[in-house]
Amino acid sequence: MAKIAFIFPGQGSQEVGMGSDLFKSDSRFRELVEAAGEFVKEDLEKLCLKGPDTKLIRSRFLQPLLCSVSLGYLRHIRESGVSADVVLGHSLGEISALAAAGVLDDRQTVIVSAKRGMLMDEAAEKCDGTMMAVLFVPLAKVEQVLEQMNEPHNISLANDNAPNQIVLSGSQDALHRFSERLKAEGVGKCMKITVSGPWHSHFIQSAKEQFEQWADPIHFDRPHTDLVLNATAKTEAHPSTIKHLVTWQLTSPVYWRECMNTIRDMGVDTILEIGPGRVLAGLARINGFSKTTAVYTVNNLRGVENAVNHILKPQQVH
């Protein structure tokens, strides 16, 4: 019997036109998008289907759209008879995972993601920060260079995604100087990431504090499915702990590599990435899930059908 993980992508997995098949055929999905659009005062369907990219990337619009698309495909997966043993999401994807685990309902989830995105945008507008991927460099080396720079208020670890795949948040200048240090040593490769702010860092402390205050009266239920959180890479079940860690995550690193180790230790042998793109499927392979682990990308309704057929009717699939 397969042990299944549902994993949900975050910012960076989007594309103009995502969820187009859901817009055409799924009235409940459209209701989610409309609710989010009313909250952020924007025609999110038009933005999602037609762009432009420069506007779609804004967190206040992108985050509820990503959650809505993920939850739309999730519902089709569940209605087809496939359920998860454990759920988790990368950064924003953690909000989608709250719905998958029954901590919040779908409408609450898209509103929470919209508010989260609004606050992140507001904080980012007040600073000169961004993010940079550091490739082919072990975490220990990255931490060594950060320690040598000794500028914790200018640059810090944002994501530990996989062996040799780290993301930093910081000021433009500090990130450039970090890149130049690696270049001088002839190691690794640094790439700026197209994001609208320096996420998972103290630069957006104001967003974290406001989000925590705003979320305080929202009721979180106990998860009905194991839920692994980014900040600890452990399963968490107490509602108040979950709420604290979900809000804390805005300024805390995403320990995705450790999250992958956690679900491997749980015996997961089937992974469904539910939502736009296929970033997390790639990271699963990089994090050591070999071909003995089935990894499916569910970013359209054909992906739903493919995953369901392989999981529920393996004897009919060749």
Image (cartoon, grey):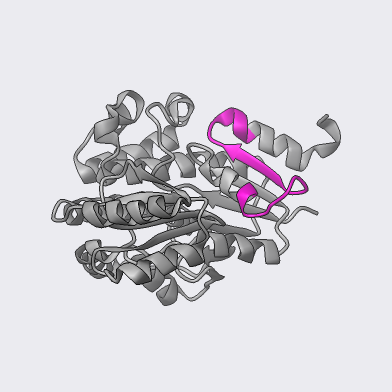
Residue 35, image x and y in percent? 30, 42
Task: Provide the residue span drawn in magenta.
Answer: 285-304
Residue 99, image x and y in percent? 47, 55
Furthest residue toward left: 126
Q: Nearer the viewer, residue 187 or 31?
A: 187
Residue 294 lies in magenta, yes or no?
yes
Residue 25, image x and y in percent? 48, 26
Image position of 1 (left or right of 175): right
Q: Quadrant of the C terminus?
A: top right
Q: Is residue 205 above or below residue 186?
A: below
Furthest residue toward right: 315
| Picture residue at 76% right of the left edge, 41% below the top | 312
| Picture residue at 26% right of the left edge, 50% below the top | 197
The answer to which quarter of the image holds residue 127 is bottom left
Image position of 302 (left or right of 217): right
Image position of 48 (left or right of 98): left
Q: Quadrant of the N terminus?
A: bottom right
- Is residue 91 visible to us here? no
Image position of 20 (left or right of 198): right
| Picture residue at 40% right of the left edge, 70% below the top | 245
Q: Is residue 204 above or below residue 12?
A: below
Q: Is residue 121 above or below residue 104?
A: above
The answer to which quarter of the image holds residue 281 is top right
Q: Nearer the viewer, residue 183 or 72?
A: 183
